[in-house]
Image (tube, rainbow, N blue to C red):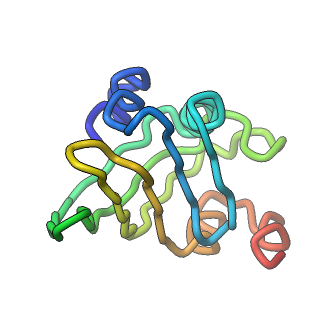
């Protein structure tokens, strides 16, 4: 998670098993493979260059890690084709990391996307979330 904050995306991808998969449950988006996951990282960090997490709590299972944290950021770049609002967000997130040995096979995140888009002043994006 720290390499995502520091934007060391190559290091982040290296924690996966050779084929990263990133699922955003509330938006039904799936990023599969190096190129798609890297594009996701770059796009979201353009929209929210100060994206970070706080209050992380880790729960370890036999084949995974569940992390609860607050995700924060400020909309300072284009987001879904819309110009930045300059508004900040803070949403609670649960991330589920599945493992095969010591490598991540999948990261699946859960959060209230409506809260995020309302906080950044982009309620027009709510229709995207309904589909």
Numbered circles on residues, count: 0
x, y (%) of residue 72? 40, 53
Q: Residue furthest front?
A: 101
Say if 102 sits above or below 28 in the image: above
Q: Position of residue 63 (x, y in %)?
A: 24, 64
Quarter residue 115 falls in: bottom right
Query: In front here: 113 or 17?
Result: 17
Residue 60 percent across, percent down from the top left: 14, 66
State the image coordinates of residue 79 (x, y, percent, origin top left). Answer: 72, 44
Q: Quadrant of residue 75?
A: top right
| Residue 34 higher or lower than 74, as above or below | above
On the image, which quarter does residue 130 sit in? bottom right
- Is 118 displayed left or right of 19 in the figure? right
Task: Look at the image and tell me in which quarter the C terminus lies.
Answer: bottom right
**In-front residue for pair 85/127:** 127
Image quarter hosting the N terminus: top left
Q: Residue 116 vs residue 90: left or right?
A: right
Which residue is at 85% across, 73% downward?
127
Residue lying at 44% horizontally and 32% vertically, measured from the top left: 18
Q: Is residue 92 above or below residue 122?
A: below
Point out the residue furthest to the bottom here.
130
Q: Vertical placement of 124 versus 50: above or below?
A: below
Which of 34 and 101 lies nearest the eye of the viewer? 101
Q: Residue at the spot x=39%, y=57% of the render?
A: 71
């Amino acid at each position: 998670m720290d390499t995502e904050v520091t934007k060391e995306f190559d290091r982040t991808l290296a924690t996966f098993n050779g084929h990263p998969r990133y699922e955003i449950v509330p938006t039904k988006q799936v990023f599969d493979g190096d190129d798609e996951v890297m594009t996701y990282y770059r796009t979201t960090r353009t929209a929210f260059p100060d994206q970070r997490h706080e209050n992380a709590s880790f729960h370890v299972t036999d084949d995974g890690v569940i992390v609860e944290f607050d995700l924060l950021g400020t909309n300072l770049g284009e987001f879904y084709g819309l110009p930045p609002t300059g508004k900040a967000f803070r949403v609670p997130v649960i991330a589920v990391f599945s493992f095969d040995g010591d490598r991540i096979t999948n990261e699946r995140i859960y959060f209230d996307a409506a809260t995020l888009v309302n906080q950044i002043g982009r309620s027009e994006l709510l229709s995207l979330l309904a589909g």
